Amino acid sequence: MTRVASCPSCNSYQSIRLNESQLSCIKCKKKWGILCIHCNIGQLVKKNTQLECTHCSKPQSPSQLTYIIKNRLHVDATNRCQYCNSPTLSKKSSNITSRCFDHPNCANQAHLFDAPKKQDPLVFLDFETTGLDIGQECIIEIGACKVDEDGKEYFFQELVKPTGPIKPIISKITGIDDSMLTHAPKLHYVLDDFLAFCGDANIVAHNAQFDVPWLLVSILRHQFKVNFSKVLCTLKWAKQIEPGKRSLGALSKKYNIGHENAHRALADAVVTKSLYDIYVGSNETVPFEPVDRYLAMSEKIVAQCSDFTQP
């Protein structure tokens, strides 16, 4: 039985379990059947180690199903992959455009049929917060896109409960208001899941001077382990090679990167990943820095603001 999501019925955090061919909430006990990804008509039923559709009889891997539900992706059985004719996945609210259901084996990118080159796993990170003061404000959303050593993408997006109401200016910028955070989990639980999601992947952020100390301060306060060793700031990188404005919004316009949901964490993280791909393709060196550069600053913030901790 696999944990896949929070419950849409009772709002319990990470309480939905995938058990064979059924979703169920361990808190409110509500259950859901699962429609076939391929035809969107038949129900999925267990058959040996796979799931199979009662209508089209096509198999469905439980791991792929878990991936779709966990990342809250929209399945489109009409708009199909041009290479293998599989359904496509998308998440328009986070700039995750249509990609093959078997992503990244196809992903509408022919070069991915070549033998993949192993790479260090990366997590493209963005936080939305109640303000700019890392020591005294709260994280209200964590969004990230992880690319593993084989080039496969995974997504993380969770709202987080702050210690108090959100300022109107923050709601105006992010679109996140108090009503959206009523049932949001506490930072400790989300951070625990997020660090498990990251593993030992290194961190990439646009303005890492902001996001990485937020992450490290939270890790230190909640006594978790720092598992990453390197950080890349795409803003700093842009300042080395770009004239003019280098904000994420300005660069997304320059390079025609879809960014319709600016200032939501996962949307910004996905744009950061796209910008990184552009820079990597046109530069010989990638300017990673050791995490120690950010750790010393974060330890100082924790010491100076010891009277505040977001639970």
Image (tube, rainbow, N blue to C red):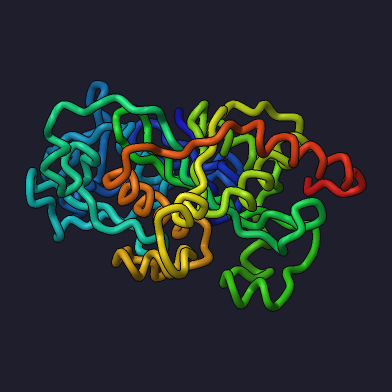
* Foreground of the two, 216 or 280: 280
- Residue at (39% x, 67% y) in the render: 259
* Foreground of the two, 81 or 133: 133
Does the image show residue 33? no
Q: Would residue 264 appear left or right of 100 to someone viewing this image?
A: right
Residue 85 percent coordinates (x, y): 8, 48
- Residue at (59% x, 54% y) in the render: 127
Q: Tell me: residue 141, above or below residue 259.
A: above
Residue 306 percent coordinates (x, y): 90, 43
Q: How many marks?
A: 0
| Quadrant of the drawing holding the C terminus | top right
| Quadrant of the drawing holding the N terminus | top left
* Foreground of the two, 301 or 65: 301
Image quarter for residue 155? top left
- Residue at (54% x, 56% y) in the render: 9
Residue 174 percent coordinates (x, y): 58, 69
Residue 148 percent coordinates (x, y): 37, 32
- Residue at (35% x, 63% y) in the render: 92
Q: Work out which residue is located at the far top of the displayed protein and give it.
A: 48
Q: Would residue 141 appear left or right of 262 to someone viewing this image?
A: right
Image quarter for residue 286? top left
Does the image show residue 2? yes
Q: Would residue 29 appear left or right of 293 to someone viewing this image?
A: left
* Foreground of the two, 215 or 195: 215
